[in-house]
Image: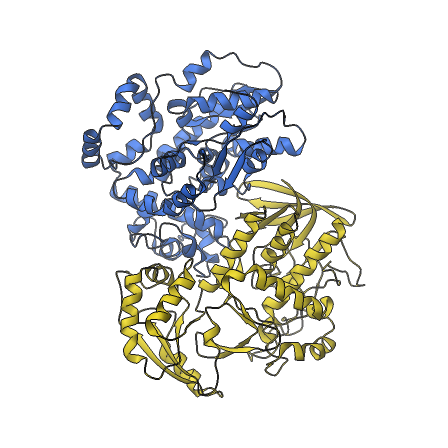
Chain colours: A yellow, B blue
């Protein structure tokens, strides 16, 4: 197959870069092993949550942060680009109503009742921004195994912020044999089911400012589902992201996939990039392995967005040899064989956290001397070295801004 | 399995160890979306498979899997979920025995041969509400399920009367049962399009690929069918030639499923897999090399295109759209729904017809909204299902290309 740009990976960075390019009129094919990481993601846009102390004003904290971390992807692309990337995302994902901005982090409840800072939220979560003394009701359905409202409420109440959280578990089973989220979100499409749930919630509504539910409020008609519940309860309703599958993440996946299709791009799932062919500093083609078949994609430019160690973008074998499996790119930040790979204290910085591919300012992977290895290969997202998104709470910000930077570099080249 | 009961490395069964229970497959499964009778691809695949010891199947719900294959395609971990479930269903059929209906639906070649000499009677019977109601009671074939029109002039029959180009690069045309017995014009148009592009089209006598047998869990017969077809498409000087398929699901059987699901490891089957192409995949390759003729006349139609599940499972993108975008005057609406529901013979069964119609409902709604003159799809049973549900005419996309080359 021939295309102008081959995108490898269908997570946040792969899809955002592909949409950006396709909307600029570039012919893009996205290949990915599967439907990508968005189905596992809460779909908030985290920019910077800890540095290492809690950050409440990301834009205020970022100048010092990037000067302390010159290898960080944010430092490579520059903060102005972060601002325009966020604006692009808000416009592209307008249907999901992302609220917020770079000046203020909101604190959201996790599915365990922990507090988590994030800069932009889909509108299904905005009423869930926590504050001292805020009176929220956390509710769920008995038998739904991915969410325990008592645990969430008690943890919120005992947090430093002291949220005034109560909880209720509804005895409702509908006609589902098993309360898995896929079945629940199907059931909630039915107005009668929503009516039932609202009546069961009403007795617990005294003095409550907002109602938090696990994120099961409809895949396609989510706004209508939520607004209906809000109307019946007379209060704002917010979603709390659950264990996978994450419905907010799937909504974002559906949205970006649709935008890509409308812009003429192609998404090919079930296709894993395996090896490449190059002529000097130009990558000519990537071969994808399917069962019993091999397909070759020829393109003018290639973007690697396959994620980090968690997603298989970096493979580590049993003898702790790490490699990037498609282009065999050099990795930086990988602990040596004799060094410790893990710190037994889970929440401390892990020695392998910053491992990844080093790139230049336009996202081209570089060698030890800092020279670009290929002229038409770009690496974006969680594959990059120099960040620890888990601890920084910076994953989506990095994915988004590096994806758009690579797209920009490809467009400049084409001009 | 080995003596210890361990799955062979690299086997379909061994892939279940890659499952991290992310449930992406269940959020994409179109059957689970509409019914509680199917417990879901993860639950029945990588989870239940651990309890299958080879001689008993611990559940019956796996019979409600439609074999659309979407679960495998969306799995970020590379678990062969649909393949695990297909094999589990075959074991279930061994345990329980197979209904006569499934034996019948699984053999379109036998059905086609029986219908051909009495085509007018067959077509009348299929249109008779009384007989169809009886068919549902006695056989379990849903009274409303779409049945194609049989023809007394099969593709094979027409082929004998058709003068053919005897020069140019030789390729083999795998036309499939549906073309032979129900849609012979599709075969004629395909030959015309290929000959117009300078090919010498070899059309050996050929039988069924065994896909319906496979999806009905009848593996031993399916293996026999696919081996016989492999010989027909390879012998008599055809070995090594490219093979093009118009039926996208039957093409996938040759490309992959015979090896991966049925476990047929013979060298001829592997060689055939490597040289088999979906028709438009083949034409797009030619176009990318500048070898496809583009002497098109305008085709002033609005068409909606649905990529069948088995077409999307080939990882070739949407080559029909790439080629049809070259046709002047044609307006193409790209549909973006996963499945029409019927999945081969699934939707014709009395107990599954409603499920299939519910699975396809979002697709049918999008088609109605697009108000096309014609709906295009490379899957024949998908076409019949779409026509049945929307009342709109359907065609294989090669029909548009045939028109664009001036064919009538």
- Against B286, residue A268 (above or below) is below
Residue B238 visible here: no
Query: Residue A407: image x %, image y %?
Result: 68, 56
The residue at 40%/29% (across/down) is B225
The residue at 18%/32% (across/down) is B134
Residue A241 visible here: yes
Query: Residue A211: image x %, image y %?
Result: 38, 76
Which corner quadrant of the image does residue A89 belong to?
A: bottom right
Which corner quadrant of the image does residue B180 belong to?
A: top left
Q: Nearer the viewer, residue A215 or A353?
A: A215
Q: Going by the image, does A229 lie left or right of B408?
A: left
Query: Residue B193: image x %, image y %?
Result: 55, 23
Q: Going by the image, does A84 lie left or right of A371?
A: left
Q: Nearer the viewer, residue A240 or B23?
A: A240
The residue at 61%/60% (across/down) is A13
Q: Going by the image, does A235 lie left or right of B239?
A: left
Give the mark count. 0
- Against B151, residue A290 (above or below) is below
Quadrant in the picture for the N terminus of chain A:
top right
Query: Residue A332: image x %, image y %?
Result: 71, 66
């Amino acid at each position: 197959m021939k295309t102008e740009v081959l995108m490898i990976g269908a997570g946040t960075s792969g899809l955002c870069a592909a949409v950006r390019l396709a909307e600029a009129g570039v012919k893009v094919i996205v290949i990915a092993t599967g439907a990508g990481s968005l189905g596992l993601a809460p779909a908030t846009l985290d920019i910077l949550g800890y540095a290492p102390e809690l950050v409440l004003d990301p834009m205020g904290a970022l100048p010092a942060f990037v000067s302390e971390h010159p290898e960080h992807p944010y430092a490579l692309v520059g903060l102005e680009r972060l601002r325009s990337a966020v604006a692009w995302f808000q416009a592209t994902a307008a249907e999901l109503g992302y609220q917020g901005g770079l000046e203020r982090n909101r604190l959201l409840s996790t599915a365990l009742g922990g507090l988590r800072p994030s800069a932009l939220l889909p509108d299904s979560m905005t009423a869930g921004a926590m504050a001292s003394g805020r009176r929220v009701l956390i509710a769920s359905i008995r038998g739904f195994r991915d969410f325990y409202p008592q645990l969430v409420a008690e943890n919120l109440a005992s947090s430093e912020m002291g949220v005034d959280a109560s909880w209720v578990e509804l005895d409702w089973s509908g006609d589902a044999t098993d309360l898995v989220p896929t079945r629940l979100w199907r059931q909630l499409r039915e107005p009668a089911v929503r009516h039932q749930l609202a009546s069961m919630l009403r007795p617990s509504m005294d003095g409550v400012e907002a109602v938090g539910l696990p994120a099961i409020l409809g895949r396609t008609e989510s706004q209508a589902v939520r607004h209906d519940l809000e109307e019946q309860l007379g209060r704002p309703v917010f979603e709390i992201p659950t264990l996978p599958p994450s419905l907010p993440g799937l909504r974002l996946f559906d949205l970006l996939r649709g935008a890509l299709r409308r812009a003429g791009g192609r998404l090919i799932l079930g296709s894993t990039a395996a090896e490449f062919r190059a002529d000097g500093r130009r990558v000519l083609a990537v071969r994808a392995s399917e069962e019993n078949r091999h397909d070759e994609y020829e393109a003018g430019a290639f973007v690697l967005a396959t994620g980090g160690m968690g997603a298989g973008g970096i493979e580590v074998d049993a003898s702790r040899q790490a490699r990037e499996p498609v282009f065999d790119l050099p990795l930086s930040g990988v602990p040596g064989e004799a060094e410790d790979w893990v710190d037994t204290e889970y929440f401390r910085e892990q020695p392998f956290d910053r491992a990844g591919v080093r790139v230049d300012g336009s996202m081209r992977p570089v060698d030890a001397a800092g020279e670009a290895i290929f002229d038409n290969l770009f690496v974006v997202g969680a594959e990059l070295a120099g960040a620890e998104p888990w601890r920084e709470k910076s994953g989506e910000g990095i994915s988004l801004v590096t994806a758009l930077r690579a797209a920009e570099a490809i467009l400049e080249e084409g001009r | 399995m080995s003596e210890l009961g361990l799955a062979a490395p690299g086997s379909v069964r061994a892939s279940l160890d890659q499952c991290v229970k992310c449930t992406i497959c269940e959020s994409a499964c179109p059957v689970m979306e509409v019914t509680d009778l199917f417990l879901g691809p993860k639950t029945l695949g990588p989870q239940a498979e651990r309890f299958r010891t080879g001689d008993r199947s611990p559940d019956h719900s796996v019979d409600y899997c439609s074999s659309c294959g979407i679960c495998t395609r969306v799995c970020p971990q590379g678990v062969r979920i649909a393949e695990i479930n297909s094999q589990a269903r075959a074991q279930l059929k061994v345990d329980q025995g197979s209904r006569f209906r499934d034996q019948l639906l699984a053999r379109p070649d036998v059905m086609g041969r029986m219908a051909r000499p009495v085509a007018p009677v067959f077509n009348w019977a299929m249109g008779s509400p009384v007989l169809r109601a009886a068919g549902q009671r006695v056989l379990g074939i849903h009274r409303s399920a779409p049945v194609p029109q049989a023809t007394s002039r099969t593709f094979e029959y027409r082929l004998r009367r058709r003068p053919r180009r005897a020069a140019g690069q030789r390729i083999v045309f795998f036309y499939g049962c549906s073309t032979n017995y129900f849609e012979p014009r599709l075969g004629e148009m395909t030959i015309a399009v290929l000959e117009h592009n300078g090919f010498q089209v070899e059309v050996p006598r050929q039988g069924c690929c065994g896909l319906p047998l496979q999806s009905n869990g009848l593996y031993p017969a399916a293996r026999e069918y696919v081996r016989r077809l492999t010989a027909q498409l390879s012998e008599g000087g055809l070995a090594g030639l490219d093979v093009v398929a118009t039926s996208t699901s039957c093409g996938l059987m040759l490309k992959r499923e015979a090896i991966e699901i049925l476990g047929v490891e013979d060298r001829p089957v592997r060689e055939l897999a490597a040289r088999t192409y979906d028709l438009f995949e083949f034409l797009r390759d030619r176009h990318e090399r500048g070898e496809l003729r583009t002497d098109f006349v305008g085709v002033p139609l609005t068409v909606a295109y649905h990529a069948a599940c088995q077409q999307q499972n080939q990882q070739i993108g949407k080559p029909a759209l790439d080629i049809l975008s070259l046709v002047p005057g044609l307006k193409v609406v790209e549909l973006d729904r996963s499945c029409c529901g019927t999945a081969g013979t699934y939707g014709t069964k009395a107990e599954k017809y409603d499920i299939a119609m519910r699975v396809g409902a979002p697709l049918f709604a999008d088609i109605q909204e697009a108000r096309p003159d014609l709906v295009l799809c490379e899957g024949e049973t998908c076409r019949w299902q779409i026509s049945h549900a929307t009342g709109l005419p359907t065609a294989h996309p090669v029909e548009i290309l045939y028109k664009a080359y001036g064919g009538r």
